[in-house]
Amino acid sequence: MSSYVAPLKDMRFVLNELAGLAEVAKLPGFGEASPDTVDAILEEASKFATQILDPLNYSGDQEGSQWRDGAVTTPKGFKQAYRQYVEAGWPALPFEEAFGGQGLPKLVATAVEEMLTSSNMSFSLCPLLTQGAIHALILCGSDALKKAYLDKMVAGHWTGTMNLTEPQAGSDLALVRTRAVPKGDHYLISGQKIFITYGEHDLTDNIVHLVLARTPDAPEGVKGISLFVVPKFLLKPDGTPGERNRAKCASIEHKLGIHASPTAVMVFEDAVGHLVGEENKGLAYMFVMMNAARFSVGLEGVSIAERAFQRALAYAKERLQGKDLVQGGNTVPIIRHPDVRRMLMLMKSQTEAARALAYVVAASMDFSLRTKNPEEQRKHQAFVDLMIPVVKGWSTETGIEIASLGVQVHGGMGFIEETGAAQHLRDARITTIYEGTTGIQAGDLVGRKIAREAGATVREWIVGLRNFDAELSSSGNPDIQAIRICVSAAVQAVSDSVDFILATASKDPNAVFAGAVPFLKLMGITAGGWQMARAALIAEKKLATKEGDQGFYAAKIATARFFADHVLTQAPGLAATVTRGSAAVMALSDEQFLAA
């Protein structure tokens, strides 16, 4: 079974050439993000992912987390790995020094997060949720809550959770029934929450639950939701864990994948909780966590795609079967066969495109938070808001596709658990569901991010893409000219679809939402193609000046050309589905679906 190797060469290329790490490092507070420091971080993260986390991925999947009498035991090796993770300072990487963090850009933390997730997705989920809880407390918590919890959480000594979903509510948080009754300086929280990632575990001596609940006089619907901190152990006067709170894990789920990550059913029975911010504003606070989590889940799509690709590539180089179609002769590795090459190139090109888009969005996050220029801040925040559902939705759907291709490359052996290919597909399958399904992301994209603002941000992006066409036109490289044709067609497809959405949303919302997921895919492949085209132009210049690894740059142009020919060419068809496909979606009555 092949080991994970961090794709540092491509990561550095994307960080430096596409995402603009040098400019990000000039932002206030990012002075530590020097090239030498970032290189050292990437190297150490690569070692930790390969040497510590990757060896636990398969064994953790096979063993799974175990629940007994309210306690959860993580798989063998996880507790020790988490201790090493904390001792190395990885949890503190993206947070401000004022809260005990290392003050490094989100862009750098994104590359590290990709490595951790590729090597062991189940392990990485615990830090992912903790970071979301930290962000919510930093932005919305009182000074007392920050003092009580943040330093321990930033250091990784305590972990955090998000408690949103209830059995009757699902994604509709208006149906939340968990109650919060005031009592002195705190509230008593009662209710049940499901699908709580790392809601109970043995990695740390306290877990900080962020819980959505309703106070007795709260208005109905989402306007009546408040957010509370409910720790597993109440804090003693000196700030250390004391008495056990009345928040219990009733069970953990038996899941298709991510077996090592405990997904808890949490029961709160008059558990002590402390209000975060103001009453009835919990949904707005929770979206701070949700947006951070949605970006990270999109990055999971990139990560699992990279891991599935590496495993399939290793197998394709080793597996001997069939003869060369041109030369004949002896049996050859299956990587010599055109269809296997096609699958591997689909895996490689889409992974690189999704990585580039995610890192570029991460850089915009840094600018939106740190730049002192108001107009620059506005533009970057608008771009981030537009692209978060695309990163989440498109990257995860693509991750599933690539993991499935990984099984296919293995042939029959891909269906056998021992090869490891099937685990990637099982693990990837949840990514399009949690933190908002692909349909929810697509609805957010067309409804909030486009229709509600009359398409201002997306049209600004389209103008930028059309201006970029001039850069592509200046190249004499035939591959880049072929890429240009496909990018131009994709941009036109997006533009036509946006026009349809804006003209139709108010008078026939069903027609718009019926094509929302195809539109999200169209946005994803166009944004990914934009980044691959940028990469090809940069690679062309590097080849002309004979800088760096010439083989890498030649491969980057070839990979971008493949993406254009095999993925971007889908754009006009997707636009046709968006603009003309709604009638067939809504044509059948409920009864007509079953032709009995």
Image (cartoon, rainbow, N blue to C red):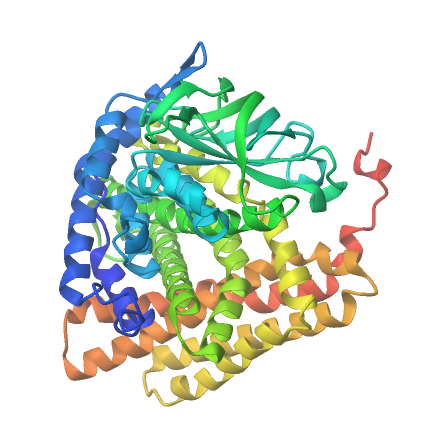
How many marks can you see? Answer: 0
Query: Residue at coordinates 23% horizontally, 44% vertically from top-left?
Result: 314
Front residue of 454 and 582: 454
Front residue of 269 and 57: 269
Query: Residue at coordinates 47% horizontally, 21% vertically from top-left?
Result: 245
Q: Quarter-wise, where is residue 312 in the image?
A: top left
Q: Is residue 458 left or right of residue 418?
A: right
Query: Residue at coordinates 32% horizontally, 32% vertically from top-left?
Result: 420
Residue 307 visible here: yes
Residue 2 visible here: no
**Place of residue 268 in the rendered image (x, y in percent of width and height, measured from the top left):** 56, 22
Front residue of 486 and 423: 423
**Place of residue 332 in the rendered image (x, y in percent of width and height, measured from the top left):** 22, 46
Front residue of 106 and 146: 146
**Place of residue 53 in the rendered image (x, y in percent of width and height, measured from the top left):** 24, 35
**In the image, is residue 445 above or below residue 185?**
below
Query: Residue at coordinates 59% horizontally, 27% vertically from top-left?
Result: 189
Give the quarter of the figure containing the N terminus.
top left
Q: Is residue 467 left or right of residue 510?
A: left
Give the quarter of the figure containing the C terminus.
top right
**In the image, is residue 28 above or below residue 236?**
below
Query: Residue at the top extreme?
Result: 69
**In the image, is residue 290 above or below residue 273?**
below
**Place of residue 405 in the rendered image (x, y in percent of width and height, measured from the top left):** 41, 45
Q: Quarter-wise, where is residue 449 in the image?
A: bottom right
